[in-house]
Amino acid sequence: MVILYQYEAARMESDAERYFWATYALFVAVSSILGDTVIIVASRNKDSFRLNKFLVTIMQHIAVCDISVSLTHVLPSAISLFADRWVLGEALCYTKPYLSYYFYPANMSLICVLTTGKFLLLRKPTRARNWSQKQAHVICGVVWTFFFVYPILMLALGKDDVSFDFRTYSCEYGWNAHTWKKIQSVMFMMSALGPNAVMIITTIPTLKFLVEARKSARRTKKSVPWQGALTVSLTAIVYFLSTMPATVYLVGGSFAGPESRFHTLYRYGIYIAMANITSNFFIYTLTITSFRRYLKSRIKEVSSSRNKFETGESSLSRPNRDKIETAQSSKGHNEPTCEEIS
């Protein structure tokens, strides 16, 4: 199939702007893949994340989802921005929207599970403390399974309704089928407004707990467990703020014509939302002491190994140099001088 191009009015006229966003998207993709891989590996060590095991398991699922978004959405967008068109072939163009509309809603819902889990841990600590990793995997598995509804409906209602969109410099789904007009509001509530509302409702009590914990710590001069609450709160706040511009566009974009410059807001909204998938590594590094300690220990191990390797290489090469110098020295003594020849 031939790739169609839409929203030509939103095409970037400045190469400098296009290269800026391309570099930004590439940075997000690479930092997310590396950072989330570190999170997954570190979370398998119980001493690196000294948080509730139920929450840590959900954080693992979020990291996997972030990597998936980086590979299926952010990285192709970066390549298209550098090339100023789609260069990854028709098959990937028609596959990419289905993957994007699977991983993005799943990501949002997994963060909702994280904030709700922390909220319940604070409200019912005795009961929630017994939650297991298996239960967390089951709940996250339900989320992963449920959001197959998007790609299934997209295939059923218009499998070829895909084009290259200059608003995001990526292949996007068109949502042009008449049925979408009827269920669009329901899908929007299910994938955007609903999860955001749950996130806000469950994060506010967690923030309140943080304030009270700080006051209690000052009053009693004792440490109060706050790392988990701060980590979950920052994760939710960053996600909510990063997705707000795109949410505003989704609300008002239907009232704008196809040639309106208002559609550029969608681009900036999507690009700002990309920051969410690379933020968790930095949030965890900032708020979780055990994770920082884990990173420092691994950096020291790598540095120590490198020093040992360089020292070993130097010690191995020294005898060789000594042999060469000895040989050259003896050769110099054995060679006759000009006076001896004469």
Image (cartoon, grey):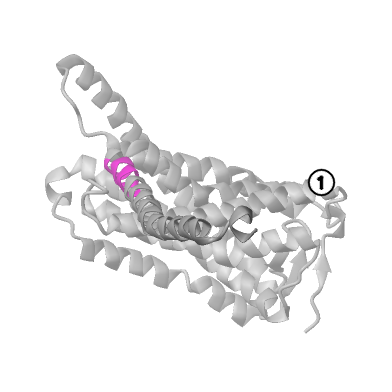
Corner quadrant of residue 317:
bottom left
The vertical placement of 203 against 93, above or below, is above
Q: In this view, does 228 lie to the left or right of 281?
A: left
Residue range highlighted in magenta: 290-298
In this view, the residue in front, 143 or 167, is 167
Q: Is residue 216 left or right of residue 113?
A: left
Query: Residue flagged by tag 1: what amino acid is it?
Result: Ala
Q: From this view, report whether residue 71 is shown above or below residue 34.
A: below
Side of 34 relative to 167 (left or right): left
Query: Does 219 sit above or below residue 246?
Result: above
Residue under label 1: 16
Seen at 63% across and 76% down, the residue is 95
The crowding category of the residue bearing disc 1, from other C-alpha atoms within 10 Å (few below 14, some 14 to 19, many at least 20), is: few
Q: Where is residue 171 in the image (x, y as percent from the top left)?
A: 71, 68
x then y, percent, for residue 285: 38, 41
Res. 131 image quadrant:
bottom left
Q: Which residue lies furthest to the bottom in this view?
A: 1
